[in-house]
Image (cartoon, rainbow, N blue to C red):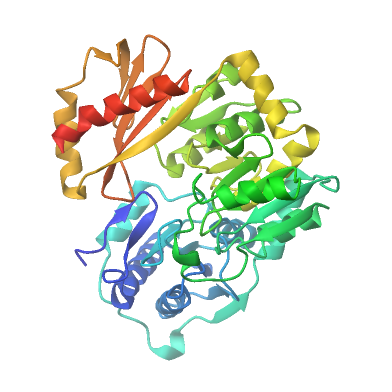
Amino acid sequence: MDKIAFGTDGWRATLDIFTDERVRIVGEAVATYLLDEGYTAPVIVGYDARETSPGFAESLAEIMAGHGFDVLLPKRDCPTPVVAHAIVDRGLSCALMVTASHNPPEYNGVKFIPEDGAPALPDRTEKIVENLAEPDLLPEDQWGEIREIDPVPDHAAHATDLVGSDLSDLTIVYDALHGSGRGVTDKLLESAGAEVITRRCNQDPTFGGGEPEPSPHNLQPLADAVEEHDADLGIANDGDADRIAITTPERGYLDENLFFAAVYDYLLESDSGPAVRSVSTTFLIDRIAEANGEEVVEVPVGFKWIGKAMGETDALMGGEESGGFSIRGHIREKDGVLMALLAGTVTAAEPLDSRVDRLLDEHGEIFASKRSVGCPDSEKTRVLSDLSDHIPESVAGSAVAKTVTLDGFKLLLEDGSWLLIRPSGTEPKLRVYGESGSLDRLETLLDAGVDLVEPLV
């Protein structure tokens, strides 16, 4: 049990550690938590496209049924946000989602999603961890029923009602990266009238020999396909389709910060409300909000904090630079399927490149990126403690105007740029983020950040 550690979004590990025995222990802990809290409604157990995921899902379903819960099991792998939506749509107690998201094939994981469909906050996951134990099931005649369902149509209907768009003039290239968005995101776009050209939409548990991470490098083939087919837009999802990435005809890979800005700007044309962004996400959102008389709420990295703040502020949109977004009227969980439909809607109103150009002309250029520095999980707390004693008065020639400690250390510089150093919640790494008004300045900033933290590891 000491190998089971809940991080930013549940428990994730390599398959030598993520074993069926330990998965059953997690199921036992969730069942015990639900019973202690008085939950009696059915649960749903979803799973992604990894080779081992269906088996782990069946084990979790058996444990939950063995504690008297009726269990809904999707007929095939499906996106995390589709499973999360089913919780609210069907009035369920929770979901367990077997997925390692964007990690390579040798990983798997399990997410606990509570009854509101938003990511679980630490007060809940800590209680689950306290209940980790070997399974102790009821007599078999007292078990709940395990029943197969298809949660995709209900999610698609909700997304269509919420976004309500006509994409009949668009050609979109969709790249599933062999993940669970295949046959879901592309079909939703087609149902809105778009001509959809698909890439990597066959199931391949090896993810083509890579990982289902919609990074600029992995999406160069998508950008090439957009150019080849003279398409209006390229859309990709990560392995469990809770995140989205975009390529455009002029820019190729579109920085997720710029996509966030474009969508928020579009939503403000017909609605109002604050935005919620993570501490690692662009200040361009703040500039757009200010120009429209709106506020921005800054939260730590992790969509659970974005979801929490969206609920507290009735935000119009929440998002993070890693490609996770949601909007008002939807579950407070990142949803790459819904956002694909919304990306098409924004593009149908005005080409994304044109909108982004206009926003940058009005609010100033932004260049943002991040790097990683290897750091064992056991050393992260010490390194951050040491870093607190080494905060410089200036970074890359610009004075530090303010230090924000919401999540790690964010250094706001007098020239308007910023540098953030924080621990990864899913990998043995420290993240170094930066944003500036020029690409050269950004690279200098990130170099300085790496130089600051590497000697402390």
Give the quarter of the figure containing the N terminus.
Answer: bottom left
Horizontal and vertical percent for residue 149?
63, 74
Q: Does residue 442 appear to the left or right of 144 in the view shown?
A: left
Taking depth in this image into account, of 352 and 61 the one nearest to the observer is: 352
Camera sees residue 68: yes
- How many marks overall? 0
Task: Write the residue at 55% across / 74% down.
Answer: 73
Q: Is residue 419 above or below residue 320?
A: above
Which quarter of the figure is the C terminus placed in? top left
**Which quarter of the picture shows residue 398?**
top left
Task: Compare residues 49 and 205 and report the one nearer the observer.
Answer: 205
**Residue 336 location (% of width, % of height):** 59, 50
Q: Position of residue 168 (x, y in %)?
A: 85, 48
Q: Relative to residue 84, is residue 152 drawn left or right?
A: right
Vertical order, 240 against 442 (above or below): below
Determine whether, in the image, residue 73 is placed left or right of residue 155: left
What's the residue at 17%, 36% (across, down)?
383
Residue 4 falls left or right of residue 353: left
Q: Position of residue 225 (x, y in %)?
A: 67, 51
Q: Is residue 419 visible?
A: no
Q: Residue at x 52, y 76 (%)?
A: 70
Query: Does residue 236 lie above or below 382 as drawn?
Result: below
